[in-house]
């Protein structure tokens, strides 16, 4: 007996060391499946002894694999696989029409193609956990949900969960070039090793698909919107096919960006005019070719006539002409076009804020049914804070997708902790008042413009080859939150943060509470030390790393920070009221009225819509100048608070990830100071005002900050 | 009792699954430390109970960490740490002069600064395993050796090992740009995350240092020889310092490439003339600045006046003028200059093979003592086979380093299995006959040109952020073999392959034997399907991926494959005998005679030195044409043989790595066919001869192969 116990102790010691040696890197994301405590195992294991499922179907096979992996981790043993109920402790996966569901009256019709039902019930006299759905993908989603409930220590003895996505297309856009350079990427190279595809499928592709499926992402665009037509050539389609085969069992369809001039570049035509019959025939043949290779191909994502990309305007055609040509080529195969509304032109003197609206509103109703217009959350470009895009609610006949940027191009890259759930929630909750009060952006997205019309959301991925996938541990939360919000745009950022923290770090409330607090305060910290009070686009040129509010010498006016802040000796801010560009006129009257009136505009959007004197009094009674300075210091103080919270978690989370976050927070603290000092030095050179009491002057002259160059900062466009 | 056993079984099952879940990725390289079998553990564990060492010294701390990690993995428990011998089972680490060694007569003097001694002996009446050395680095090397012996299941009860490196500088050159792009890199991005340095030191840097130290590499150049002067600016030196701090405990010094025009680019000078006093003062001040930040900085590596890089010739100065200026700046700090001999010019009509010799031989004796000339293994550029570089043996007053390319720029990138140990062995064993017969390249490297003169070897790294480090499992062997040969240029490629296979895959002879066989035949396979019979430089342009023997339209003659093979209707090959360019005249007469005579030149170098008719009869009696075709098919057959050997290992090695190698071999097979078909189609267009019986014609016309474009192939120069 003693020998046996000694053996146990020896084995346990070995096991503990093995675990320690495999320090957590973050690779496992929110699917860590760490062992549950013994009492929980005792409670749940008897209910998870075996799984009844048809493993011959690829997506059900994926669900089984995940249940095996998850339960082996959580309760220490993978379930048996069975073809029929054989007593207590079964998990049953069944789609509508399965004999297993005979006699049950399940509300499957309401769940749609991808929803699922998770219920404790009785089959053949045995109490089982039933996962039911209208499709195998629904079963996969239900399996992930069951594993999530276990990870969260939720009771599973009286389950009654129904869930279905509120949007149809839940898309991840990768801005990845074919040489694996990732535009605006801060997490290593592109995951897609095109050189080795199709001959070698990195096992990581499967882990990527698992992660996406676990949060309901069902569409992937692997290549950059600044597109290269080579992706549409036959050799690359074979590579894309290999990826599609990995993704398919996980309910994920692949889409590609289509370079509008591809008929010229790889087709040998002299034009890409969308009304030219040869061009139309070329795209039709290309679509046929793609579907012959990838039968469930999703369709095209297009950036046209923006930032140098070719498009229909090159031929004096409208965006509808361009999108519809592609839509017609895809329609016979069920494909869709996601056409980006991020359009502004160097030949247009109008406020950049207004240009997309001017361009697209007149086209409402002119797009084919299989076209979605993909609209960024704000009218400029993924700033730390922007008001919602005026197109939302303005095109009642056109399916609009929301495009958000998961990668933190304008929020400090990977080393700044900034949870974006709160930012996206702010946009989704914004009331467009179109057609009526309560028509939030979320409602605009969720409400099909016609029966069977498309709905969707797109997120620009923050994923690369870094072992932690996203460049930082906390940036994983933004991938996670994007997926959750694309599934349910009404979900709460705080709930999502809490789920993520529990899954990713620890179920211990002493860990979860401070992490959630950090996440919820983090984005506002970035706003405060980068772009307080409605400022925007004041980052350094090109790579957008660090401050550059003084930059005024770029070729196009709207590339210069000075275009956006319009600061001078008298004041600061962009007048977008009727006395200025009247971009506000593009919003519903209720919105325009509130934001156009200095008495009602929120301080957080003040300088976005108004130009005010430095001594302007905010409603708080403080001057704009003093408040501006205070915001910068508040931003820094918040980061310091995050550092303190994190210091308190030492030893409560694994050492490797803890140290990484500690180091990143120190970098963030340092760069917040850089932002603050450089910005204040510049504003002060214009305002000529002293800093309010209690705020330290920047330690260096403005020229020092202006001279800082970071030529090799990652992610710049190429 | 039954409960206890059940618990053991349950724990074992869990552990087994956990191991399975952590499938091997290759990240652990040859330092896997997998559990030894029970009988071996029983034999060795009692001898490894505790370690006596001064853990306050950083390098000894590193040795202790490695022993902890290694023994925990191998025998299941990390050793105790002790400050004195306390009975049987100790491992004692002691440097010369330690009281622990009092009374022992150890041959430490002969071991040099980095050698070590590993001996079973008695201290204080107890039998211990002693690791002794003249430096802490020697102790670290000895600790790695002990762990290696354990991994190889060698007996450790009567140890008596002495070893010391035969070369002083064992350098890894990374051709990594500051934006993390790796020139000729096929293993992901650069490891060096400059954006996050110095604030964040990726734990992987430590694993990199461990791997290097385990094979004796003691110098790292982290940045590209096609250099960017920014690395020498103050912000980057802080980043380099952070890397140096990680590397220092592992006995590794950091060096940097110096862009010759840095005084202009970052110094604000108008010239970089090495004889200009302001330039000399700038470099001196720069060296002082670097050493103030990194006290053990190693020195500079320089590529000058080659392929567009600036250099002393821009000012009509010699390479010695340039190197000596930098050497003078470094000398007060003990730094060295590694000056590359890879120099050829577009203004020089001489056979490229001859240019380096012409340039450097007259400078013999003109370099400072702290300059080494870094010479590629061959006179052209890292081809699958080249004769040794004529500079070896030709500069008796100048320390020469051998530079080899670990990354497989010209050998199929990461997916072609090609063990380079045999290639380097072939070069190292080549007899230069200078000053006498038996003066092999290895001897030239090992023999200091004067007492205390420098010696060294450099390898161009194949390391990146891929989880397996090198882009493929088998490419790890080339990193390993490079380190082993830099330590001992007389080591045998087969021994190294066997060690690597046992450490990396399995101690099972049924695994080791076929793997070693594959490795030993692999490089010749590549020679056969790419560049048989002494051909060279027939790869596609720029990226060098795939065949391009037809290319003849590049700006500089020596960039064109046609320059190298000189094939036409009559024959093929480059006449480098006295009737041609007489590059052979740069070798010792014995060499020139053997290779210059058609009766004695080996077939493997025939076309490197001779232009012969297609119907030329080899000594075997076969015609050149028939033999050429046969070589291509032999290459393919060898790859097929490797596939068969590998198929036999399924289930004998871990599944994930096995599958990766299987897929890569399939890619290699396919690309070998591409090489064969394209090359034969082209040669046949010139020779107009039918294929010999039994050899299939290329399935497509030459135009098909010529039209293949791979614009996004990795690693191209940028």
Image: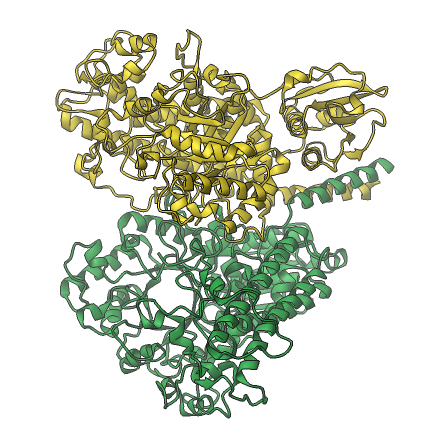
Chain colours: A yellow, B green
Q: Position of residue A112 (x, y in %)?
A: 63, 20
Residue in front for this viewpoint, B87 or A515:
A515
Which residue is found at the position 34% from the left and 43% from the top? A713
Residue in front for this viewpoint, B160 or B33:
B33
Count every numbered label the image shows and give the total: 0
Q: Quadrant of residue B365?
A: bottom left
Q: Quadrant of residue A595?
A: top left
Please state if B111 lies on the left or on the right of B179 as rendered.
Answer: right
User: Which quarter of the rendering shows the C terminus of chain B?
Assistant: bottom left
User: Which quarter of the rendering shows the N terminus of chain B?
Assistant: top right
Please state if A517 lies on the left or on the right of B633 as rendered.
Answer: left
Please state if A625 lies on the left or on the right of A665 as rendered.
Answer: left
For residue A190, above or below residue A432: below
Which residue is found at the position 27% from the left and 60% from the top? B259
Q: Quadrant of residue B502?
A: bottom right
Residue in front for this viewpoint, A709 or B284:
A709
């Amino acid at each position: 007996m003693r020998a046996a116990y000694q053996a146990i102790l020896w084995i346990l010691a070995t096991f503990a060391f093995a675990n320690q040696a495999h320090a957590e890197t973050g690779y496992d994301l929110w699917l860590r499946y760490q062992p549950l405590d013994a009492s929980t195992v005792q409670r749940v294991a008897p209910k998870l002894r075996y799984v009844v499922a048809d493993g011959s179907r690829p997506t059900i096979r994926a669900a089984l694999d995940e249940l095996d992996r998850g339960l082996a981790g959580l309760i220490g043993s993978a379930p048996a696989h069975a073809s029929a109920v054989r007593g207590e402790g079964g998990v049953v996966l069944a789609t509508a029409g399965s004999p297993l569901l005979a006699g049950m009256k399940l509300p499957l019709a309401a769940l749609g193609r991808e929803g699922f039902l998770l219920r404790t019930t009785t089959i053949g006299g045995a109490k089982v956990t039933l996962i039911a759905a209208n499709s195998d993908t629904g079963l996969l989603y239900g399996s992930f949900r069951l594993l999530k409930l276990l990870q969260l220590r939720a009771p599973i003895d009286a389950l009654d969960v129904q869930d279905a996505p509120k949007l149809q297309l839940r898309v991840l856009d990768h801005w990845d070039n074919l040489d694996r350079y990732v535009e605006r990427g801060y997490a290593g190279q592109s995951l897609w090793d095109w050189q080795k595809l199709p001959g070698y499928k990195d096992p990581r592709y499967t882990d990527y698909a698992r992660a996406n499926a676990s949060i309901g992402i069902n569409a992937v665009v692997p290549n950059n919107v600044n597109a290269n037509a080579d992706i549409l050539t036959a050799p690359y389609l074979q590579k894309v096919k290999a990826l599609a085969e990995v993704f398919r069992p996980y309910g994920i369809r692949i889409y590609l960006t289509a370079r509008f001039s591809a008929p010229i570049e790889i087709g040998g035509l002299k034009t890409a005019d969308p009304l030219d019959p040869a061009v139309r025939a070329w795209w039709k043949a290309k679509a046929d070719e793609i579907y012959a290779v990838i039968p469930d191909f999703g369709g095209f994502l297009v950036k046209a006539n923006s930032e140098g990309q070719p498009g229909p305007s090159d031929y004096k055609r409208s965006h509808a002409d361009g999108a519809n040509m592609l839509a017609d080529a895809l329609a016979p195969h069920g494909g869709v076009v996601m056409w980006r509304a991020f359009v502004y032109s160097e030949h247009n003197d109008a406020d950049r804020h207004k240009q997309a609206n001017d361009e697209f509103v007149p086209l409402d109703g002119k797009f084919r049914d299989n076209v979605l217009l993909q609209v960024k959350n704000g009218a400029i470009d993924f700033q730390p804070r922007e008001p919602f895009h005026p197109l939302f609610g303005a095109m009642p006949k056109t399916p609009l997708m929301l495009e958000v940027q998961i990668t933190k191009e304008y929020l400090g890259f990977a080393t700044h902790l900034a949870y974006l759930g709160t930012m996206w929630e702010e946009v989704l909750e914004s009331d467009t008042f179109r057609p009526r009060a309560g028509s939030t952006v979320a409602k605009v997205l969720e409400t099909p413009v016609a029966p069977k019309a498309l709905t969707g959301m797109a997120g620009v991925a923050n994923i690369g080859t870094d072992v932690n996938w996203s460049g930082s541990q906390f940036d994983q939360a933004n991938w996670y939150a994007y997926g959750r919000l694309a599934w349910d745009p009404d979900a709460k950022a705080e709930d999502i943060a809490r789920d993520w923290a529990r899954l990713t770090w620890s179920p211990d409330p002493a860990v979860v509470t401070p992490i959630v607090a950090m996440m919820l305060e983090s984005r506002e910290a970035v706003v405060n030390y980068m772009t307080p009070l409605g400022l925007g686009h004041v980052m350094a040129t090109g790579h957008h790393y660090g401050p550059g509010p003084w930059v005024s010498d770029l070729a196009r006016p709207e590339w210069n920070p000075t275009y956006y802040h319009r600061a001078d000796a008298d004041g600061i801010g962009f007048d977008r009221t009727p006395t200025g560009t009247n971009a506000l006129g593009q919003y519903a009257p209720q919105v325009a009225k509130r934001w156009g009136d200095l008495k009602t505009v929120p301080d957080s959007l003040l300088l976005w819509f108004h130009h005010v004197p430095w001594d302007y009094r905010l409603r708080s009674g403080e001057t704009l100048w003093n408040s501006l300075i205070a915001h910068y210091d508040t931003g820094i103080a918040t980061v310091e608070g995050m550092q303190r919270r994190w210091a308190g978690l030492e030893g409560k989370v694994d050492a490797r990830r803890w140290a990484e976050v500690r180091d990143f927070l120190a970098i963030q603290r340092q760069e917040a100071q850089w932002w603050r000092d450089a910005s204040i030095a510049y504003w002060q050179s214009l305002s000529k005002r002293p800093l309010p009491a209690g705020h330290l002057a920047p330690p260096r002259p403005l020229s020092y900050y202006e001279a800082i160059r970071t030529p090799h900062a990652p992610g710049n466009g190429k």
